[in-house]
Amino acid sequence: MTRTARLAVVLAVLAVLAVLGSTAVTVAAYLGRDDADARRTPGAHRSGQPAGIEDGDGVGQTVGGSHGRAAFEVPSAREGWTVQARDTVLYYVDRHGEPSVGVRGAAVFRAGYCRGRTDSNRAFAGFAGSVAGGSVRAVNAELGRRWVRAIALDADLATSGPHTPLRTRDVTLADGTGAVRSTARIKVLRPGVCDAPEVDFAIVSADSGGSVTSVVMVRDTGVPGTLPDEAADEILATLHVVRD
C-alpha cells in the first residue's frame, strides 16, 4: 500500500499468505477488521456502497471502492472470478518487508489454480485508493511507477526483475468517460513450477469528483490458462463513477 493512496495501513496483523502465481512470495494478504464493512449484509448492493456482489443471473460481479465513489465489473464466479471480502488486502512488500502497494477487496482470477496452493491465482484487480489533488495523468503515472517497482522486486527483497518502461496513454472507458491508462510487463526472476515467466501490469485512473480513482490489474502471462489481453481490457474499461 502506498502512502499516496493511504490504503488500509491500520489493519490487523498478517494472517495468511496469498501469492500471485508468477510473483513468488512478494504478494501477501492479511485480514483486518473494519466495523463498517463487517456490518454490511452480504448480497446487499446500492448506489454509493458497491460491495462486489455477483448478479442474480450469474452474469457478472461488481467491485466497489472503499469510499463508494467508483466501481468496475468482472465476470461471474462460473468464469473463474472471486471477489474477496473488504477486509482482505493483497499487497506487495518493499525491500524491508513492509507493505508497499496493495488493493483491498480485490477480484481474483482462478484462485487456487496451482495444485496444493490454495493461495495461488492467475490475476487480480482492485482499487489502488482514491487520491485527492493532482491531475489524473500525474496520479496514474506515479502510482504506476510504484506498482511496477514493487512487482519487480524479487522474493529475496534485494534484486529486481527487468521490465518494460511504463507506457501511459489517454483512453476512453466503456461509458464514454475519459481516463488514463499505464501498462508495463515485468520478467519474473527464477519462476517456480506454477509460475508464469512474465507479469502484465495495468492501472487505469479517472476523475471521480474531487479525487482521482485508480484500478490496478496484475496478471500472469506467457503460459496457458492466463487471462487474455482482450478480457483484461474489457474489465478495466468498466471502471465508472457511482452515481447516487
Image (spheres, rainbow, N blue to C red):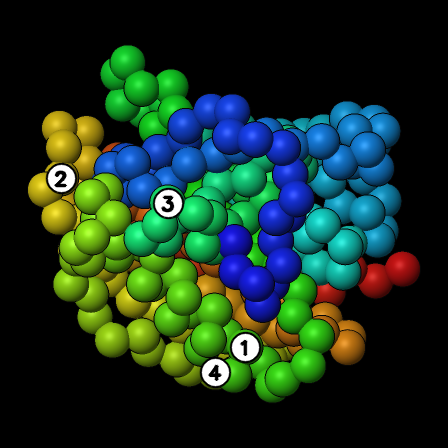
For the residue marked with disc 3, what is the amino acid?
Gly
CA gap, disc 4 to disc 2? 33 Å
Please name the residue shown 51% across and 24% down the image.
15
Residue 212 is left or right of residue 41, and the answer is: left
Neighbourhood count class around disc 2 (C-alpha, 10 Å): few under 14, some 14–19, many 20 upward:
some
- Residue denoted by label 1: 139
In the image, 114: left or right of 13? left
Q: How far apart are marks 3 and 2 (CA)?
A: 20 Å
The residue identified by callout 3 is 97
- Kindly indicate the quadrant of the structure image that contains residue 67: bottom right
Q: What residue type is labelled 1?
A: Val
Along the viewing direction, whichever of 112 and 73 lies nearer the viewer: 112
- Do the CB atoms of the residues marked 4 and 1 lie less than 8 Å apart? no
Give the label, 4 or 1, closer to the camera: 1
Q: Earlier in the sequence, mark 1 or mark 2?
A: 1
Earlier sequence position, callout 3 versus callout 2: 3
Q: Nearer the viewer, residue 86 or 230?
A: 86
Q: What element carries label 4?
A: strand
Question: Identity of the amino acid at label 4?
Answer: Asp
**Sequence-wise first label, 4 or 2:** 4
Q: Mark 4 points at which residue?
A: 170
The dot on residue 191 is 2
**Mark 1 burial class by Cα count in 10 Å: few <14, some 14-19, many 20+:** many
Foreground disc of the pair 3, 2: 3
| Residue 50 vs residue 10, the one in the foreground | 10
Of callouts 3 and 4, the N-terminal one: 3
How many badges with numbers are in the image? 4
Badge 4, how many Cα within 10 Å: few under 14, some, many 20+? some
